[in-house]
Image (tube, rainbow, N blue to C red):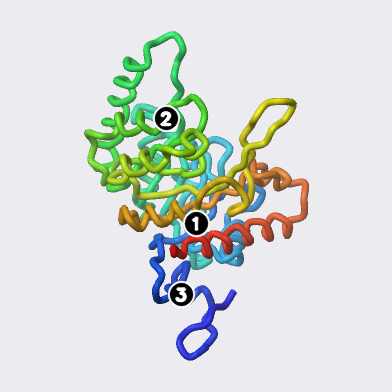
């Protein structure tokens, strides 16, 4: 992909930022567009890194969790290999996605320590669930204790952990509960991975409030799109390609500019893609069909990041 530079000279996208500046426009300043490696788990490390590079990404957000590209029990052996492959392809290896929810879990410290030693700057945490048989305030207090311990471990290893807001009925769905859990913590070490798709599913008109509330704690972003679909008389959420759904990306990026949020972006492609959308290790459609869909989303995202 090429763009026109000064004097009409064609510049390859690799020699520019992830997007370009047009006079008279405010542009959201991201720290690179990264591909969620979940969607390439049918490829080995070298194949995954090569594909991400050829699709124009700046880096890879690597799955380091059960059934991910790197399994927790093999993190000390396999994470260095994965990072080496990503960097050899000329890409950034700054983000990982984990299942970590507690400093006491078996592989938590190994994952955090190994990631930090390899120069990884951010990790996404795993999910916490609310139990029906215990008052929610009591559960939140317990989770606060867990988060505090993780903040201390992150500080020790010089890495940032982030809990993602997610539609549904788990911890983080209302967004306000994330703020309650992290409000007394140092945002340098533990914060929120903000996902506007999930925020809009749960608060179509109030998502801006949640974003403003969490702004000091946001150091990374997840992006995808959705639409409402009626099936058998019931409404459901359906993930769709970037720009084809209900997410108001122009308003979102404009607010990110206003709030001075500058963060790496992880692109998710969770609409039907022959299993690649779900992290399959074998896919049922041609490789090129997956690459074409992902590339189209990345290109659309770059267009949307230019804010009028």
List the single residue furthest toward the top: 133
Q: Marks 1/2: CA distance? A: 26 Å
The quarter of the displayed image where residue 151 is located: top left
Q: Nearer the viewer, residue 1 or 198?
A: 198
x%, y% of residue 16? Answer: 46, 75
Mark 3 vs 1, N-terminal side: 3
x%, y% of residue 283? Answer: 73, 46
Mark 3 vs 2, N-terminal side: 3
Q: Nearer the viewer, residue 64 or 239?
A: 239
Relative side of 236 to 13, left or right: right
In the image, residue 153 sits, relative to residue 47, either above or below, namely above
Label 2 residue SS: loop
Relative side of 4 to 206, left or right: right
Give the residue at x 73% y 60%. Answer: 288
Q: Nearer the viewer, mark 1 or mark 2?
A: 2
Q: Nearer the viewer, mark 3 or mark 2?
A: 2
Q: Are marks 3 and 2 in contact (CB under 8 Å)?
A: no
Give the residue at x 43% y 51%. Answer: 95
The answer to whether residue 60 shows anywhere in this view is yes
Mark 1 vs 2, N-terminal side: 1
Identify the mark at residue 216; answer none if there is no mark: none
Q: Nearer the viewer, residue 183 or 254?
A: 254
In the image, residue 32 sits, relative to residue 274, either above or below, namely below
List the single residue furthest toward the bottom: 7
Q: Which residue in the protein does label 1 denote? A: 34
Mark 1 crowd level (few <14, some 14–19, many ≥20, 10 Å Cα): many
Label 3 residue SS: loop
Give the residue at x 40% y 60%. Answer: 30
The quarter of the displayed image where residue 308 is located: bottom left
Q: Which residue in the protein does label 2 denote? A: 174
Q: Which residue in the protein does label 3 denote? A: 16
Quadrant of the image for the N terminus?
Answer: bottom right
């Amino acid at each position: 992909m090429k763009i026109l530079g000064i004097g009409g000279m064609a510049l390859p996208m690799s020699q520019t930022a992830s997007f370009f500046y047009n006079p008279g426009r405010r542009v959201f300043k991201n720290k690179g567009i990264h591909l969620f490696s979940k969607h390439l788990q049918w490829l080995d490390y070298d194949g995954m890194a090569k594909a991400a590079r050829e699709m124009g990404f700046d880096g890879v957000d690597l799955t380091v969790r059960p059934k991910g590209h790197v399994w927790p029990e093999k993190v000390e052996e396999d994470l260095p290999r994965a990072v080496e492959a990503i960097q050899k392809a000329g890409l950034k290896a700054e983000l990982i996605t984990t299942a970590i929810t507690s400093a006491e879990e078996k592989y938590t410290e190994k994952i955090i320590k190994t990631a930090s030693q390899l120069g990884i700057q951010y990790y996404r945490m795993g999910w916490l669930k609310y139990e029906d048989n215990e008052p929610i305030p009591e559960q939140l207090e317990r989770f606060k204790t867990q988060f505090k311990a993780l903040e201390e471990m992150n500080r020790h290893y010089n890495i940032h952990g982030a809990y993602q807001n997610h539609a549904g009925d788990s911890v983080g769905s209302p967004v306000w509960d994330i703020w309650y859990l992290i409000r007394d913590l140092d945002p340098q070490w533990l914060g929120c991975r903000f996902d506007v798709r999930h925020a809009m599913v749960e608060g179509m008109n109030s998502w801006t409030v949640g974003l403003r509330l969490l702004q000091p704690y946001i150091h990374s972003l997840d992006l995808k799109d959705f639409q409402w679909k009626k099936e058998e008389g019931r409404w459901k959420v359906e993930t769709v390609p970037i720009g084809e759904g209900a997410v108001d990306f122009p308003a979102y990026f404009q607010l990110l500019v206003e709030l001075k949020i500058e963060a790496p972006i992880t692109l998710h492609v969770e609409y039907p893609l022959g299993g690649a959308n779900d992290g399959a290790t074998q896919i049922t459609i041609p490789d090129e069909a997956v690459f074409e869909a992902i590339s189209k989303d990345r290109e659309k995202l770059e267009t949307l990041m230019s804010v009028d």
